[in-house]
Amino acid sequence: MVVWPILSSLIMIFILIVPGVFFKKKNILTEDQNGAINSIVVNLTWPCLVIDAMQMKFSLQVLKDSAYILVVCLLILAIIFAISFPVAKLIKLPKTKQYLTVFMLLFGNTGFIGIPVIKALYGTDAVFYAAIVELINDILIFTVGILLIQLSAGANLKVGFKQFINPGLIGVIIGLVLFLLNIQLPNLIGGSIEMIGNATTPLTMFCIGFQIGGLKFKEIAGDFQVYAICFVKLLIVPVLTLLVVKLWAGNFSMLEKVLIIGFAMPVGAVASIFSQQYKGEAAFATKSVLLSTVLSLITIPIFAIIMEL
């Protein structure tokens, strides 16, 4: 097992933040223009990314493996949810940041960083299972996650069916239906969706970079609460996942490795994107995304190596 493919994937994605920082420092884009890019990501490119990830041939074995991943993911997410509020209160966060912290501990960067890293580590066959983890994340992000972000932004919620209908969830539903019915989109349509989906990572990283460009270094590196969130997200969460998987399966097959690496991902960039869109604690989210991504350069290789011992 080679560590360099993991590091190179993370560094390559991290470099995509630089243009956003430059555009902010040079005042090339306004906040409103950056907000428009956020909307493009949330409402167009990300749903296309999900649909493209689900364009895989149906089989009963794949369905069984997917069900296994679903059960284990939900179990681990339930454990994370149970510890998230006590953690948020322990580090003395205000109410709005507590909801955001629960979101950040639950949802890692399983798509933008997770899929490229898992592909580099375990090959193309592992990408499907990484997409299943991403699918589960997407469903919860665009339901439970949206509620947490809105609570963080101080919104008055009226929870109803319409509350959960959004482009991201629609993309998940379309992708899942196509997979279950074993429908492969024609190249003309599928290729276009793939191209749009491929824009998600650079656009997301650009938006994060733009937010970082408005922060001072001391604001990023000197926030104890952000370090505490990174510690839980990058060490406690994957250790819990590793223990659950070890007790459940015993050995680390490809499925187990995908699960553990998926939960070892840094805070999802969507925390920053959604916080900007809903006018919540965007700066706090962005600092957590950035610092956890940097520190994950150390922690992800550690867990990848542990599973090979």
Image (cartoon, helix red, strand yellow):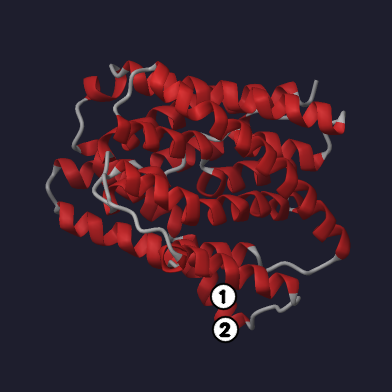
Q: How many marks?
A: 2
Is there a contact, CB below 8 Å, between mark 1 and mark 2?
yes
User: Would residue 111 appear left or right of 230 to someone viewing this image?
Assistant: right
Residue named by callout 2: 188
Residue at the spot 43% in from the left edge and 66% down from the top edge: 166
Q: Secondary structure at mark 1?
A: helix
Q: Nearer the viewer, residue 84 or 221?
A: 84
Residue at the spot 41% in from the left edge and 50% down from the top edge: 147
Q: Secondary structure at mark 2?
A: helix
Badge 1 crowding class, 10 Å Cα cut-off, few under 14, some 14 to 19, many 20 or more, is few
User: Measured from the top left, where is residue 126 in percent x and y?
Assistant: 74, 49
Pick the quarter of the image with the C terminus: top right
Q: Name the disc covering residue 94, or none.
A: none
Q: Amino acid at mark 1?
A: Gly
User: Measured from the top left, where is residue 206 in percent x and y?
Assistant: 33, 49
Q: Amino acid at mark 2?
A: Leu
Q: Is residue 137 visible?
A: yes
Question: Can you say whether 263 is above or below 177 in the image?
Answer: above
Badge 2 crowding class, 10 Å Cα cut-off, few under 14, some 14 to 19, many 20 or more, is few
User: Would residue 153 appear left or right of 112 to someone viewing this image?
Assistant: left
Pick the quarter of the image with the N terminus: top right
Q: Is residue 29 visible?
A: no
Q: Name the disc covering residue 191, or none.
A: 1
